[in-house]
Image (cartoon, grey):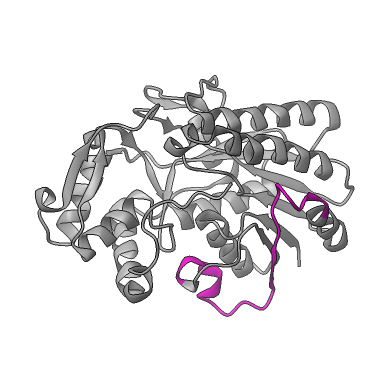
């Protein structure tokens, strides 16, 4: 039974991957800076798992404790989902983004490269490092970050290239398209739209929703991440995406139709967010070709699952903050 250490296990992606890894028979250690939130946001609590342990530790403040835990438990794999992840908000407190995404992350990498038991480190990055781009881009597309968030993530990614070249550090990097699914934070576009409609509130649609994205169901991302973690090539980057592209407006319109409401009654178009990229679409042929991965959940199916999750947990979700809550 392999042990997997998941940093950022309270995040939507981290918690969903924890559940997936546990279902594969792994021993999972979860680390996040905040206490575990309500169960509705933790997919690993929706099943009977006995091989999970959680530690409330912050990369910014508890690196020594995380390193000690690492050396005591000796995980074969470390998967890092931890990041200050909001794009528009990164303009307001850029130092917080660089502290977590660059400084603390690089210090963590420096501790990881010193251990002799690590089989592979999975660095979960973001397509934001490419900036706005046309067409489907491959993993060697040049970086062109356009926000403090994107720059802070690109810096850590570039640092890992040097760690791989100099130390032979066993790292693989993933970049996924816009992930979604049951359990996602309410400030993200799909759960936010659903809850706004069910609560009778107006959704603010930035820039009229003209930007386009490729949304991928988190269960499919977990499948790809697991394959990359076990069988990916060290030093390689893998895109995880679908070929299904949709504008944000079309996505919200689809949600409105599924909830049987009029778009005009529930949506208010407002100005665009500073530095928002108009499009990034990822070519995921490498992970498909090398590791036999494919996505299974169509957007229409995934949205149905998200609506069902919100309805099932509505009494609990309606009292949760709908807006992003910044934590330095």
User: Which residue is found at the position 56% from the left and 27% from the top?
Assistant: 151
Closer-to-camera residue (271/142): 271
In depth, the one of 115 and 219 nearer the eye is 115
Q: Is residue 321 above or below residue 146?
A: below
Residue 3 among those drawn in magenta: no
Question: Is 106 on the left-hand or right-hand side of 249?
Answer: right
**Which residue is at 30% across, 58% downward?**
303
Position of the N terminus, as image quadrant, is bottom right
Query: In the rendered view, does 134 fall on the left or right side of 270?
Result: right
State the image coordinates of residue 100 (x, y, percent, origin top left). 64, 41
- Residue at 18% x, 59% y is 258
- In the image, 51 versus 288, the foreground residue is 51
Q: Quadrant of residue 51?
A: bottom right
- With 247 as the anchor, is 135 left or right in this view? right
Q: Position of residue 285 (x, y in %)?
A: 49, 35
User: Which quarter of the picture shows residue 71?
Assistant: bottom right
Q: Which residues are magenta?
A: 40-64
The image position of residue 315, as x and y in percent, is 33, 76
Above-or-below relation of 322 to 179: below
Q: How many marks?
A: 0
Q: Position of residue 65 (x, y in %)?
A: 81, 57
When the figure is inspected, residue 282 is found, relative to residue 64, above or below; the finding is: above
Q: In the visual, does 167 lie left or right of 259?
A: right
């Amino acid at each position: 039974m392999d042990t997997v250490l998941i940093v950022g296990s309270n995040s939507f992606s981290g918690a969903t991957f924890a559940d997936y890894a546990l279902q594969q028979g792994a021993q999972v250690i979860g680390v996040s800076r905040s206490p575990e939130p309500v169960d509705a946001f933790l997919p690993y609590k929706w099943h009977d798992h006995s091989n999970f342990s959680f530690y409330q530790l912050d990369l910014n403040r508890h690196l020594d404790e995380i390193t000690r835990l690492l050396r005591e438990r000796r995980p074969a794999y470390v998967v890092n989902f931890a990041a200050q992840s909001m794009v528009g908000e990164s303009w307001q407190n850029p130092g917080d983004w660089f502290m977590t995404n660059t400084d603390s992350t690089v210090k963590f990498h420096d501790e990881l490269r010193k251990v002799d038991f690590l089989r592979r480190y999975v660095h979960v990055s973001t397509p934001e490092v490419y900036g706005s781009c046309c067409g489907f881009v491959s993993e060697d597309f040049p970086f062109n970050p356009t926000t403090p968030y994107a720059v802070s993530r690109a810096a850590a990614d570039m640092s890992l290239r040097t760690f791989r070249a100099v130390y032979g550090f066993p790292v693989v990097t993933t970049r996924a398209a816009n992930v979604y699914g049951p359990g996602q934070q309410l400030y993200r576009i799909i759960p936010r739209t659903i809850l706004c409609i069910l609560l009778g509130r107006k959704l603010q649609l930035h820039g009229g929703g003209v930007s386009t994205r490729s949304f991928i169901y988190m269960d499919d991302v977990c499948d790809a991440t697991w394959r990359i973690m076990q069988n990916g090539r060290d030093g390689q980057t893998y895109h995880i995406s679908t070929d299904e592209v949709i504008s944000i407006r079309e996505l919200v319109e689809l949600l409105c139709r599924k909830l049987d409401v009029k778009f005009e009654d529930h949506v208010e178009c407002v100005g665009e967010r500073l530095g928002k990229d108009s499009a990034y679409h990822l070519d995921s042929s490498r992970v498909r070709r090398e590791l036999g991965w494919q996505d299974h959940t169509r957007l229409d199916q995934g949205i149905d699952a998200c609506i069902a999750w919100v309805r099932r947990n509505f009494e609990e979700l309606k009292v949760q903050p709908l807006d992003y809550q910044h934590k330095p």
